Image (cartoon, coloured by chain):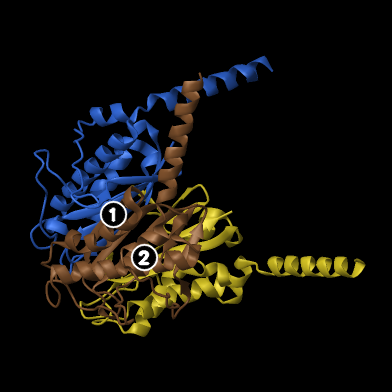
Chain colours: A brown, B yellow, C blue
């Protein structure tokens, strides 16, 4: 009985330690990611709306660290690799909005859904390789909880000719 | 103490009065908006599905008051202003469906998410200015509760060549 | 009074019998539909994520029974009928994922939302007739509970040039 209690205690403390170990805010720093201060939307919408335990984020675009947007169509102006990087930058914009909304990334319980829209030519067919730039970063930060349902599709045009626009749904505490 | 109680009471009653003041059904009338009787879908789907406190609306298109659809691609057949008007008309279609589903717009707690899809040429990059026609109307009716997360993107083609198709998610009582 | 009780009992038992009758797993078999073993995503995402009572599915594409994908743009390489069939096959992929996730289709309470994206030419305007292939199958299996909110739209490009990509949200037990 005492033995069982000890095992239970050890297991509990271990799982607690594991759960504690993942500090997503620190993880972002460790990955060398610099979050940005989200810009305010210029129209009658907001960056994110919470309803119940779900946080719906607006479509975000890719910003360079200097604040300028990454623009151009994949398959014409941009390579897959450049598209991947644009999707990665977009993930940083999304993380920045989540942190601004929730105060801490540690309130994220699960990345539920990603809709990745790639500005591309009609004959471009590697949208998943582009949107991987977003998915890979989300999983680098959140681990298994960063794995999401996803659509990666091609658009004939996006606002200001940005290379990707990505919207996500996140389950929060 | 008595003073404090009076202030509290006044504040409470004021906030109550403010909360009471906003009758969305009346607001729509005041704005001169004429809701329409939603048409029945011609296939195996419905205009809206409620799950828990969320109402998911189908993609809606822009109808003129006479029931005909607004068609044409922005950047080719339509100006931004005409696109804006099409998005505004689409918002009216969406409001009409919400009212038909819920009985009253007063059951809307928050407009959560808008996906605004603009039928446009590959070089058109002002999708947000078009979808503002929908966002502006939602905020005109619901105020702060009308502010939503949003994506505004370009499509190469839409059903019957309608100018915009917009789907929304609404939190309801 | 006794008469009323009898009627009530009969009505209750009838409705119970009706409710019992619908075994969605059997229904799929009766319709001659062969579910497939979902392939694993090749990147950092998953086929479906459950949050609360909602199951969000990734964008799925159309697979033939032999596992190959149905590709080509509607309005150029594919007719509406071929597009309809591609959407039907995509619905089978979606059902297969739902069954793999939940163990049984009987855990589906409602198909909430369908986003049907058709790979098509800019002048193609019959996206709804294509996506009906998915909607019709969902309703054939789930009856009224299969009726969903829907958007059916045109895309200039999809991954690997698949003919349709469809993502859905399902309410589950």
Does residue C120 appear in the picture of this structure? yes
Residue B62 at x, y = what percent?
38, 70
In the image, taking residue B125 as reference, residue B141 lies left or right, namely right
Residue designated by label 2: A29
- Mark 1 to mark 2 CA distance (whole Å): 26 Å
Tell me the number on the disc at residue B41. none
In the image, taking residue B32 as reference, residue C134 lies left or right, namely left
Does residue B58 appear in the picture of this structure? no
The residue drawn where x is 65% and y is 67% is: B23
Tell me the number on the disc at residue A150. 1
The residue drawn where x is 14% and y is 45% is: C63
Check if mark 1's residue and mark 2's residue have beta carbons within 8 Å. no
In the image, taking residue C163 as reference, residue C9 lies left or right, namely right
Residue C171 at x, y = what percent?
42, 43
Residue B159 at x, y = what percent?
27, 64
Residue closer to the observer: C136 or B167: B167
The residue drawn where x is 90% and y is 66% is: B1
Residue closer to the observer: C114 or A16: A16
The residue drawn where x is 36% and y is 82% is: B82
Residue closer to the observer: B70 or C154: C154
Query: Would you place residue C2 above or below residue C28 in this image?
Result: above
């Amino acid at each position: 009985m005492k033995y069982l209690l000890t095992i239970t205690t050890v297991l509990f403390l271990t799982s607690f330690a594991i759960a504690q170990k993942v500090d997503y805010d620190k993880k972002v720093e460790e990955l060398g990611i610099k979050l940005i201060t989200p810009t305010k939307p210029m129209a009658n919408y907001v960056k994110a709306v919470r309803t119940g335990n779900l946080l719906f984020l607006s479509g975000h675009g890719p910003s360079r660290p200097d604040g300028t947007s990454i623009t151009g169509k994949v398959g014409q102006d941009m390579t897959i690799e450049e598209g991947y990087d644009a999707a990665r930058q977009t993930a940083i914009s999304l993380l920045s909005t989540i942190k601004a909304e929730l105060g801490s990334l540690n309130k994220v319980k699960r990345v539920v859904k990603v809709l990745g829209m790639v500005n591309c030519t009609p004959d471009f067919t590697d949208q998943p390789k582009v949107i991987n730039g977003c998915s890979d970063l989300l999983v680098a930060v959140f681990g298994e909880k960063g794995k999401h349902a996803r659509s990666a599709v091609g658009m004939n045009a996006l606002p200001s000719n940005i290379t990707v626009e990505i919207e996500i749904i996140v389950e929060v505490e």
